[in-house]
Image (cartoon, rainbow, N blue to C red):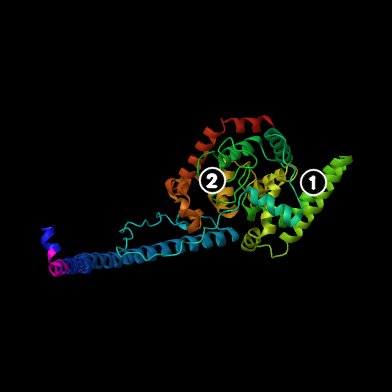
Amino acid sequence: MSMNLAGRPGAASCLLIALAVGSANLVVDQPVATAQIGSAPLARAQADYQRDLAEYDAAQQQYEALAQAYWKSVADKRQLRNAKRRNGDPIVVDDYVLAQPPVYTGPARPIDPAPKPEQTPPATRTEIPTVADFLSNAFTQFQFVPRRPNSEIEFKTAYAMVSAEAGLTRAQIVRVYAFESGGDGKYDVQAGLEYDRPNARAISTALGYNQLLNANSVELMAEKGDKFLAALRTKSASLGGEARIALERKIDVVRRMIEFARSVPDDWSQHENLANTPQGLGIHAMNLDVDVGPLLQTQKLLDSVTFARNRGLTRELSASELEMMNLTGDGNGYDLIIMPPDMREQVPTSNFFQRRGYERNPIAIRNNSAAKLLAATDAKMDVESTLQGAKDLAAAF
């Protein structure tokens, strides 16, 4: 055969040309055939997706209408209760929303079957600042490095002394510490980083034994800064040499931080804005200082006790009641803890939260009445008060 082809070059050329044309036809025709085969299923899948998406959007709109109406009723009832308390009128169970929040039960969001075009990778998600950021900003903004304790016991001893002088009890301090820090948290523990595990990441700026947010630190500096300065000056007067010089420098830093914290009106949203600036993050680093940190951590709890006392609740708050004020805010927490026990069984937890805070709090959702939330808090405190950190703090009193 090859000899015959060799003897007839024209035939060989014709054969090669025919083979080439056939190959070319196969190469050209294949994508067209694939497109014809794939386009119909894709079109059907896209039609199904659009139908499912419309159903999902309709279900979401229906749920959102219910949710907005529900949370508006919670806010309206709260305003009503506040007005009744100002007027000295009794609060009854019908002054609360007694239904649980609506739960979305519609379809999940469908997945678009259309091929995704190549995109530039999204920008890295903004990370929640951590202890390293607080320290860095304290240094760059205020030329300050906190005096960190030589041991955990040193910080616990300072905290116990400050809180006892403020009139807080050992049970209140130890049990709130156990609840907030997991029973063995260190003075620099941050929410989300309580445990040494791979890929752990901060979930908020909450820091220390009572898990103060950066906005708490700014607000406390603005509102109680003069009290902190007085305590530090008293301590300075008892010192001498280098220790006194170092504390005097710290007092000047605290004074500058107070000036910054007071550069806006005394309003929580304004303090939140300041807290996320470099200076605000630097102020948050004061929680790590063994002289100032215990003052900040104690004051947050003392403010709740004072809030309740100023409204006529003179009895000692249990640790779980104090935690309700710490968790939901003084006004909402006070509303919950003065409620008679029989009403606590009937009133949903949602009455004491803003919508966003409630929906991000699985404990509040799971323990969906005031009574259940208090009981769950006490139970958690019981367990975590047996851990070593809580025992060490109790021994420091």
**Crowding at label 2, few (<14), some or many (≥20) Cα neighbours within 10 Å?**
some
Residue 211, image x and y in percent?
A: 60, 46
**Viewer-side residue, 284 vs 133:** 133
Mark pair 1, 2: CA separation: 32 Å
Camera-nearest residue between 161 and 307: 161
Q: Residue furthest right?
A: 241
Question: Given the image, on which type of amino acid does mark 1 rest?
Answer: Ala
Placement of 236 over or under 55, stated as above or below: above
Dot 1 corresponds to which residue? 231
In percent of width and height, residue 114 lies at 30, 65
Would you say the residues marked 1 and 2 are in contact, meaning their CB atoms lie under 8 Å apart? no
Segment tinted magenta in the rendering: 7-14
Reading the image, the residue beneath label 2 is 192
Please name the predominant secondary structure of the magenta segment in the image.
Answer: helix
Residue 336 marker: none
Residue 244 to residue 10: above or below: above
Q: Please name whichever residue, 107 or 71, is drawn nearer the observer in this view of the structure.
A: 107
Is residue 269 at all visible to an observer of this figure?
A: yes
How many numbered marks, from 0 up? 2
Which quarter of the figure is the N terminus placed in?
A: bottom left
Instruction: Confirm whether the magenta stretch covers residue 291.
Output: no
Position above or below: 68 against 201: below
Q: Is residue 92 visible?
A: no
Tag 1's secondary structure? helix
Amino acid identity at mark 2: Gly
Indicate left or right for 357 with 284 as reference: left
